[in-house]
Image (cartoon, grey):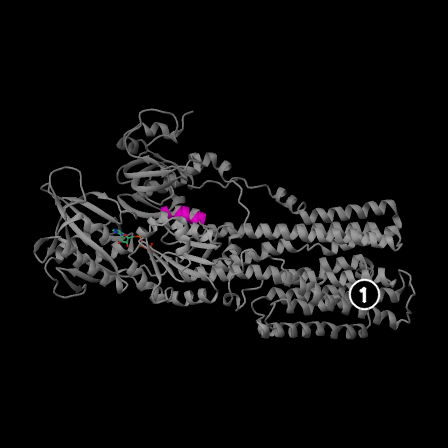
């Protein structure tokens, strides 16, 4: 069966419209509503993602889980070989751990994915349609066959359409064909062929309009589009691994290898000193299980997901989870000017007309003003909805400035703006056939097209002196931060091709675009946080410099200002060297050159966040470590290339997002410090047992109770900490810095861990000694005093961990300076931790399962000061480090 598009491709535009029961005015709203009910919303049902069962299975087969399975398998094998050793319980406990951990990880990942999907729904695609003769903007999901859509550069094609009228349209079909070279699209009828992808008058859903403008009639929506048919193929493309994911993988392997290694070493040591084989075997397994940081993976997901949600509240939508953390390590922000640093609320301030400066608001306009206004009012590509202009705010400002104009005939053509030419022209024809060309753009590109200039009512040649006059005026306006446009016009002779040459220069217009109010503060925060801010704009160097100074990006007396022209002359090495200057600013730069700057910065080892909104920005957004697209002004193309979308287009939002990203890394470190600490008091009892021949102070099942019971929630809560006040007061972390660093290991294993071990051993001997035990005696495994002593050891560890979780909230700042309100999960976690401990010590099932026995009050009173000691000593260490810093 031929694709539905092919028959329509062979019709001419009026016939194509008629074929779909539509016309040049589009569908009537009532008919559109009827069709929507009949054909359903224009949505491609999400391809069945990886089945949930498979994702669940994956949680049980990751690296940690495999080690735990191995341990459980060995325990069951041991139980089979020697039924008396209590190995079956151990095996069951480990399987329980795997199940709880896997289920929890799965739940976290599932919730994070759902949250991400919900966030992406906040960005519905809007599309302009003509219905009943009026243009309106609707949600792309409401499109129906027969709708007349208006598409322009940067739009994602919302449904399969047939071009009815088009100017310079080029489409990128990469989503369907994988080929990124844009293809021209036009309105005339297709002769033959049977491939809708090749039909030159069809625009298929999911592809991108990268140039031009057109109106097109929709002939297929939702699952009936070509994209809908292949959706299940394209949606399953895998994502690449981010630096954080790589780091997590590295840490997991390292820690798992450590756990296995320790297990094996302890096993051989035990054998060497003649411990019974099965008891020894059980220990080795216990050591392995104790050292595997089970909660790590769900904590990573939780941390990222929470940061993502907080970022969404601060107007930054994250498209890929790990991008959050990458943003936290950014060292340079390469930012646009218009709309990001400025409000994009333009207003015409000044004119340079007849060789003199004038205020735009002057009551008695100078001669020549009407011509200037005519260019301002006619030369634009605005759309009008109910008589109100919509489009580029600069053009709206110019149109408003123009006010009521005499009749200049109808608009018959346009030479579109592109960032390379930096100018645009509009062609009009009056009733008597006279045609005019109206041109506006950057003075550098408009002046060379002009032969004369308008001086009052007279036309004078634009000789070198006049050019110098205009150039000086431009610089003067630009120095005051105004964006300067040159406006020109010319009557066209005959019917020939419209050319932008021999024009008459009407004058210059200076537009004001004030900076956003909190940009200055955000720039200051970046400086404090060691993040470089580099402005890269299409505007004039002087305008850029004036704004740069106003918002605090430029503070040096003579910053390096590199223009697009200079950039073209520079080789990659020269560009890299130029970036060494302490303050750099790029002006009159095209989007393609932006990409070169990104690459040069990356070559210098920087982690680059870059903003962009246009079609041409997509490559730079993709190349940068973090691409940031504008949600308001940005095109669909830019948004699709980006990792993060700013809902408010605001520079300060980027800085907030960096703060959240940094917090993620910090939180993972807090988590690791906390859980690694308790490994030491779990290993030391065993070492003491082996080396000093004392009764075993802590059993394997009790180790599991700490690691997988009491420690879990507080550890997870550390992953949910909001950013600390100091995260933006220190430089970005160095590129090669590891998650599991030496200072972290030293703090956990060398300081906090030994303190906890001391508490554990002291509590054990305190209770055992009180029962009349003497050195060298080996009580029976079910001796009630011995059971109480091991319980005291366990209790001391948990109490110390309670103190530790507060100490771990910051590696340097005192715990009392951190607000509790930001992390309620932490208090809940500690409450659950203590409740579990009480259940372990005082309930019959707790006693039975974990080999514990109820403790007397003295044991608690003995252990508490050790927890307090850990806290005090850790705070003393922090204070000492703060003084040294
Ligand atoms: P930024 O890159 O920070 O957003 P920008 O908006 O000035 O700055 P471009 O959009 O590349 O960057 O514009 C470059 C120049 O082209 C502008 O400085 C202006 O002189 C000219 N220009 C921009 N828009 C138009 C337009 N619609 N018509 C004519 N000239 C334009």
Depth check, front residue: 216 or 780: 780
Q: Is residue 823 left or right of residue 521?
A: right
Q: Residue at x 71, y 74 (%)?
A: 869
Q: Looking at the rendering, in which quadrant would you find the N terminus?
A: top left
Residue wearing tag 1 = 791
Q: Within 8 Å of ligand 1, the CB of disc 1?
A: no
From where the camera sits, is residue 884 visible? yes
Depth check, front residue: 483 or 828: 483
Label 1: how many Cα within 10 Å (few below 14, some 14–19, many 20+): many
From where the camera sits, is residue 715 visible? no
Q: Looking at the rendering, in which quadrant would you find the C terminus?
A: bottom right
Q: Is residue 232 left or right of residue 763?
A: left
Q: Position of residue 25 (x, y in %)?
A: 26, 40
Q: Is residue 664 left or right of residue 397?
A: right
Q: Residue at x 72, y 48 (%)?
A: 67
**Is residue 665 positioned above or below 764 on the image?**
above
Quick one: SS at disc 1? Answer: helix
- Using the rendered view, name the quadrant where residue 748 is placed: bottom right
Does the stretch in magenta take in 621?
Answer: yes
Q: Residue at x 53, y 68 (%)?
A: 726
Q: Position of residue 561 (x, y in %)?
A: 33, 59
Q: Position of residue 495 (x, y in %)?
A: 13, 37
Q: Main secondary structure of the magenta part?
A: helix
Does the stretch in magenta take in 609?
Answer: no
**Is residue 160 positioned above or below 509 on the image?**
above
Depth check, front residue: 14 or 493: 493
Q: What range of the chain is rendered magenta?
A: 615-623
Q: Position of residue 545 (x, y in %)?
A: 32, 62
Q: How many marks?
A: 1
Residue positioned most to the left: 458
**Is residue 206 positioned above or below 581 on the image?**
above
């Amino acid at each position: 069966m031929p694709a539905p598009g092919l028959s329509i491709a062979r019709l001419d535009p009026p016939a194509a419209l008629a074929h779909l029961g539509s016309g040049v005015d589009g569908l009537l709203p009532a008919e559109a509503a009827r069709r929507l009910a009949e054909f359903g919303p224009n949505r491609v049902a999400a391809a069945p993602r990886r089945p949930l069962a498979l994702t669940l299975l994956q949680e049980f087969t990751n690296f940690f889980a495999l080690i735990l399975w191995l341990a459980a398998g060995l325990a069951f094998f041991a139980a089979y070989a020697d039924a008396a050793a209590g190995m079956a319980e151990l095996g069951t406990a480990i399987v329980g751990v795997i199940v709880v951990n896997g289920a929890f990880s799965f739940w976290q990942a599932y919730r994070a994915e759902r949250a991400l999907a919900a966030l992406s729904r906040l960005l519905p695609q809007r599309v302009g349609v003509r219905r009943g003769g009026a243009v309106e903007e609707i949600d792309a999901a409401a499109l129906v066959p027969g709708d007349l859509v208006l598409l322009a550069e940067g739009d994602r094609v919302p449904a399969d359409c047939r071009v009815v009228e088009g100017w310079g349209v080029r489409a990128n079909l990469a989503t369907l064909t994988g080929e990124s070279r844009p293809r021209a699209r036009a309105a005339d009828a297709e002769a033959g062929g049977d491939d809708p992808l090749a039909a030159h008058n069809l625009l298929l859903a999911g592809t991108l309009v990268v140039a031009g403008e057109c109106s097109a009639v929709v002939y297929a929506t939702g699952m009936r589009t070509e994209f809908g048919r292949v959706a299940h193929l394209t949606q399953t493309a895998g994502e690449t691994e981010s630096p954080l994911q790589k780091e997590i993988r590295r840490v997991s392997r390292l820690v798992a290898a450590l756990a296995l290694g320790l297990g094996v070493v302890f096993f051989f040591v035990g054998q060497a000193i003649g411990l019974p084989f099965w008891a020894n075997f059980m220990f080795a397994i216990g050591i392995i299980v104790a050292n595997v940081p089970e909660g790590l993976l769900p904590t990573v997901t939780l941390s990222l997901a929470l940061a993502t949600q907080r970022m969404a509240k601060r107007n930054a939508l994250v498209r890929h989870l790990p991008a959050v953390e990458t943003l936290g390590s950014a060292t340079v922000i390469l930012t646009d000017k218009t709309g990001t640093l400025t409000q994009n609320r333009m207003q015409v301030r000044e004119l340079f007309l007849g060789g003199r400066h004038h205020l735009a608001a002057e009551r008695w306009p100078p001669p020549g003003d009407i011509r200037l206004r005519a260019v301002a009012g006619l030369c634009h590509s605005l759309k009008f909805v109910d008589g109100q202009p919509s489009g580029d705010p600069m053009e709206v400002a110019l149109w408003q400035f123009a006010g009521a104009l005499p009749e200049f005939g109808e608009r018959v053509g346009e030479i579109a703006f592109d960032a390379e030419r930096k100018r645009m022209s509009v062609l009009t024809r009056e009733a008597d056939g006279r045609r005019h060309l109206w041109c506006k753009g950057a003075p550098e590109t408009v002046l060379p097209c002009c032969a004369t200039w308008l001086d009052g009512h007279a036309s004078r040649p634009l000789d070198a002196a006049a050019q110098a006059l205009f150039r000086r005026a431009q610089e003067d306006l630009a120095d005051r931060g105004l964006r300067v446009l040159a406006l020109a016009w010319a009557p066209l002779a005959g019917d020939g091709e419209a050319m932008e040459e021999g024009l008459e220069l009407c004058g210059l217009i200076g537009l004001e675009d004030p900076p956003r109010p909190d940009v200055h503060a955000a720039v200051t925060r970046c400086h404090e946080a060691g993040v470089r801010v580099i402005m890269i704009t299409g505007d004039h160097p002087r305008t850029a410099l004036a704004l740069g100074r106003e918002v605090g990006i430029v503070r040096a007396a003579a910053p390096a200002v590199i223009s697009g022209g200079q950039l073209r002359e520079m080789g990659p090495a020269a560009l890299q060297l130029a970036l060494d200057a302490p303050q750099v600013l790029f002006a009159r730069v095209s989007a393609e050159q932006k990409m070169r700057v990104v690459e040069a910065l990356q070559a210098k080892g920087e982690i680059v966040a870059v903003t962009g909104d246009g079609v041409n920005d997509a490559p730079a957004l993709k190349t940068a470590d973090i691409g940031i697209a504008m949600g308001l002004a940005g095109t669909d193309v830019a948004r699709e290339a980006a990792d993060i979308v700013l809902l408010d287009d605001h520079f300060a939002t980027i800085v907030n997002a960096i703060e959240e990203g940094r917090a993620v890394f910090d939180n993972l470190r807090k988590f690791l410090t906390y859980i690694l600490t308790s490994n030491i008091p779990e290993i030391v009892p065993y070492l003491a047992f082996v080396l000093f021949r004392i009764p075993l102070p802590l059993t394997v099942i009790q180790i599991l109770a700490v690691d997988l019971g009491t420690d879990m929630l507080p550890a997870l809560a550390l992953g949910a900490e909001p950013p600390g006040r100091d995260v933006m007061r220190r430089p970005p972390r160095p590129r090669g810095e590891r998650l599991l660093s030496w200072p972290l290991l030293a703090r956990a294993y060398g300081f906090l861990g030994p303190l906890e071990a001391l508490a554990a051993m002291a509590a054990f001997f305190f209770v055992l000694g009180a029962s009349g035990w003497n050195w060298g005696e080996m009580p029976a495994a079910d001796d009630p005093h011995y059971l109480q002593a091991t319980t005291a050891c366990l209790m001391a560890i948990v109490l110390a961990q309670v103190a530790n979780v507060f100490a771990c909230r910051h590696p340097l700042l005192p715990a009392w300076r951190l607000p509790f309100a930001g992390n309620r999960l932490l208090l809940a976690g500690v409450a659950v931790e203590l409740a579990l401990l009480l259940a372990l010590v005082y309930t019959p099932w707790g006693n039975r399962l974990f080999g514990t026995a109820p403790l007397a009050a003295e044991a608690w009173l003995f252990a508490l000061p050790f927890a307090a000691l850990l806290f005090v000593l850790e705070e003393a260490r922090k204070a000492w480090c703060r003084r040294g810093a």
